[in-house]
Amino acid sequence: MSALRDALRDLPDAVFADVLESDDAYLLVVDLPGTTAETVDARVEGGRIKLEARREKDVPDEFQYVSEERSLFLDAELPLPPDVSGTDADGHVDRGVLELRLPKASAATGTAIPITDE
């Protein structure tokens, strides 16, 4: 798990993430304000988790950007512990917080993780 924990440090400064572990799964929690289940894609592939997310920004017509610090996109690949399987993984987004439950088992390749809104 240390490789995953170390990889989280390489995420953009505006992205906050936690890793939790139980006897049978890992829980990856990523703050992605402005995202929904439709704008997040997560998959386990080749011992890595690939996360792609985009957020929507509504700018009122009478305003224009002076400074823009909130990224619209996240495209990250993180190494997974060797005991993680994409099989039976699930995820959901609630108010811009993505939670991915990654069961421990033998590694699977190319498994999409369904993401739902709560």
Image (cartoon, grey):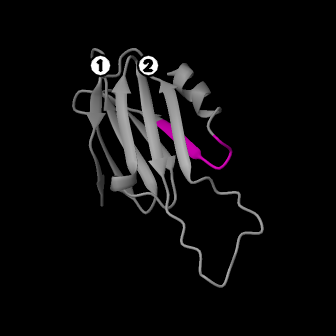
Mark nearest the camera among 2 and 1 is 1
- Residue at coordinates 43% horizontally, 23% vertically from top-left? 48
Q: Reading the chain from its start, which is encountered first: label 2 or label 1?
A: 2
Identify the residue shown where x is 51% and y is 53%.
32
Type of the residue with mark 2: Pro
Q: Residue at x 31, y 23 (%)?
A: 104
Furthest toward the bottom, the residue is 62
Q: Nearer the viewer, residue 6 or 76?
A: 76
Q: Write down the quadrant of residue 36 in the picture.
A: bottom left
Q: Is residue 100 magenta?
A: no
Which residue of the protein is positioned furthest toward the right in this rendering? 66
Query: Residue 69 in the image: x percent, y percent?
Result: 70, 57
- Quadrant location of the C terminus? bottom left
Q: Which residue corresponds to the image point at 52% horizontal and 34% vertical from the top-left?
A: 76
Q: Which residues are magenta?
A: 12-19
Picture coordinates of residue 40 (x, y %)?
A: 39, 48
Please give the count of numbered marks on the rendered protein: 2
Is 15 one of the magenta-colored residues? yes
Residue found at the far left of this picture = 88
Q: Could you say which disc has been placed on residue 81 in the image?
A: 2
Amino acid, disc 1 = Thr
Task: Where is residue 43? Give x, y as percent.
Answer: 35, 32
- Tell me the number on the disc at residue 100: none
Q: Vertically, is 66 above or below 108?
A: below
User: Where does label 1 land, which residue?
Assistant: 109
